[in-house]
Structures are given as structure tokens and as C-alpha cells.
Image (tube, rainbow, N blue to C red):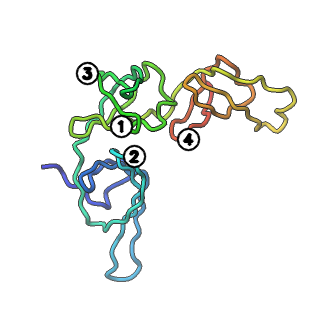
Amino acid sequence: MAALIDAIDIKRKAFFEFENAPYYCLESDISTPTARGGQTLVHLKMRNLLTQAVFQKTFKAGEKFKEPDLEIVQASYLYSDGDGSHFLDQASFETLTLSENMMGDDLELLIEGAIIQLHKYNGNPIGLQLPLFVELSVSYAEPGAKGNSSSGSVTKNVKLETGLEIAVPLFIKEGDKVRVATETREFAGRA
């Protein structure tokens, strides 16, 4: 039998099962009552790993959740086609496929050979977890105009090798490698 987790023990980045689906905790907030006899409540912002839907829900502190039958495997991105995006499990060398809606817009951050963490629920691939940062090459950048940098916070838009467009400082040019924060999709420095 799977271990049970109390709602009060669910913290940010934890996995748990609710209504027969795996969830990932994005935020957790505990409110303790000021009156006697009041119940401690746990407010969770959570993502359904099957549908990618994000919502908030409040639970009583003593409510119990099962640990999901979730396996996280290292995989490298191979390619995408009409059937979905294909990954190679680094341990079993099995090809795993994620559908277009399982991928969402994460494809904008993947290049061939990128190593990611793939989620498998009950043995089937259901989604992926990107690293905090990815390194991508700039495929198109307009030249920065001289004299625009006096304020120090001037940016320009560039197009990366995956098609993603982000704002970068003026000194970044075509061919440079940049680090992109996967959570915010923002420039995080030169690679």
C-alpha cells in the first residue's frame, strides 16, 4: 500500500495523488485559526500532471493523500513529429512519446539531445520537468543602436534557435549562446 501524506506536510515542489490523479504542488500556505476549536487549513496551488490544469484548493490539515505511482526518469529529447515529441530513456534506452498537449509550450525550450526529467505515472509517460535553465543560441538579433544604453536597462528582442523570442541586453548578438530561465522564459545571462 502506498504511503499516506498529511495535507499539512505537502510543501512546494511535492508530488501527491488527489482524486486518482497525480498532482504537483506549486505553492503551499498554512493558515492556523485564532479562535479555539478552529481548524488549521492548508491552501494549495497545484498542477494536475495529466491535464496540466492549475488551480487552488483548500484542505483540512489532517486530510490524507496517497503518494502517486510516479517515476521520474532521465531522458534526452530526440525529435518531434505528427505523433508527438520523442524522448530516449537514458536507463532503459526505450523511446517515450509525449503528445502535443502534454508538452504545452515546453518545446520552445528544447533542442535535440537536451537532457530532461520525464514523469511516468503508472508506467506511462505523462509530462516532463525542465531544468531551471537551458542554454540556447541566438538565431536572429537586430544590432543594438549606439547611444541607447545610457539608462543601462535597455533591451532588444532576439529569436532563439527554437523559435522562442525573448528580451536581452543590447550587447547580445547573433550566434551568442544565452541562458534562459525555464519558469519565466526570461534572459538569465550569457552561456
Q: Residue at x 40, y 26 (%)?
A: 82
Q: CA distance from mark 3 to mark 2?
A: 24 Å
> Residue flagged by tag 2: what amino acid is it?
Gln
Q: CA distance from mark 2 to mark 1?
A: 9 Å
Sequence-wise, the earlier of marks 1 and 3 is 3
- Check contact, mark 2 vs mark 1: CB within 8 A: yes
Whether residues under marks 4 and 3 lie with C-beta atoms below 8 angstroms apart, the answer is no
Residue at the farthest left position: 1
Q: Quadrant of the C terminus?
A: top right
Q: Which residue is mark 2?
A: 52
Q: Amino acid at mark 4?
A: Thr
Q: Horizontally, is 175 left or right of 51 in the view?
A: right
Q: How many other residues sit within 10 Å of disc 3, few (<14), some (14-19) or many (≥20)? A: few
Q: Nearer the viewer, residue 167 or 181?
A: 167
- Neighbour class for label 2 at 10 Å: few (<14), some, many (≥20)? some
Badge 3 element = loop
Q: Quadrant of residue 91?
A: top left
Q: CA distance from mark 1 to mark 3?
A: 16 Å
Q: Position of residue 45 (x, y in %)?
A: 42, 56
Kindly indicate the quadrant of the structure image that contains residue 49: top left
User: Which mark lies nearer to you, 4 or 2?
Assistant: 2
Q: Measure how far apart labels 1 and 4 are at the Cα level.
A: 18 Å
For label 3, the residue is: 94
- In the image, is 116 to the left or to the right of 9? right
Q: Amino acid at mark 3?
A: Glu
Residue located at (77% from left, 22% from top) = 143
Earlier residue among tags 4 and 2:
2
Q: Which residue is mark 1?
A: 127
Left or right: 22, with 84 as reference point: left
CB within 8 Å, label 1 to label 3: no
